Image: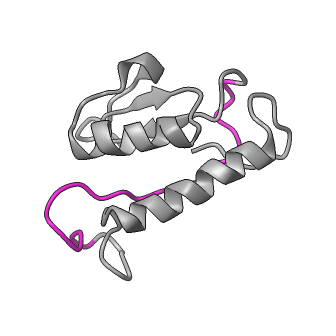
Amino acid sequence: LCAEATNPKCATPAASAEVWEYLKRRVVELGLQPMPGFGGGPPAHEGPCVLRSKTDCFRICAGGPICVVYPDGVWYRAVEEEVLERILQEHVIQGRVVEEYAIARSPWSEGTG
């Protein structure tokens, strides 16, 4: 998730920080966090887990905050709390892309390093 950019062009730092905090909270509430002390080990449960990362900017500079879901490589625009909740519920948990917010796809492939 792009959040709290030093030179914001697509979302205010306050708006993106709010979404970042929401993401952190919801990952825990939904039980999507990896096992404690994650270092490449298995998730704490069956099913999907979320390793979250905050980046300064994805250099799209429009329609932010921007979120990318890997390994699927789906890029989302306008990721406010309601949209993020749909991404978590529909994409991460159910495996369905939230098409109306998807703007690009660049899937991770085996052997990509």
Q: Quadrant of residue 16?
A: top right
Extreme residue in the bottom direction: 37
Residue 32 seen in the current view = yes
Give me the residue at 64% from left, 43% from top.
2
Is 36 situated above or below 47?
Answer: below
Is 88 positioned to the left or the right of 17 in the image? left
For the N terminus, the quadrant is top right
Q: Nearer the viewer, residue 62 or 14?
A: 14
Residue 71 seen in the current view = no
Q: Quadrant of residue 80?
A: top right
Residue 27 horizontal/vertical position (percent)? 41, 61
Extreme residue in the left direction: 46
Q: Quadrant of residue 94?
A: top left
Q: Nearer the viewer, residue 31 or 69?
A: 31
Task: From the image, give the main secondary structure of the stretch colored magenta.
Answer: loop
Residue 10 horizontal/vertical position (percent)? 74, 28
Instruction: Give the magenta-colored segment's residue range.
Output: 41-60
For the C terminus, the quadrant is top left
Please say whether residue 45 is one of the residues in the magenta stretch: yes
Q: Nearer the viewer, residue 111 or 93?
A: 93
Extreme residue in the right direction: 7
Residue 57 horizontal/vertical position (percent)? 69, 39
Residue 54 horizontal/vertical position (percent)? 60, 53
Is 4 situated above or below 24?
Answer: above
Give me the residue at 43% from left, 17% from top.
100
Give me the residue at 51% from left, 62% from top.
24
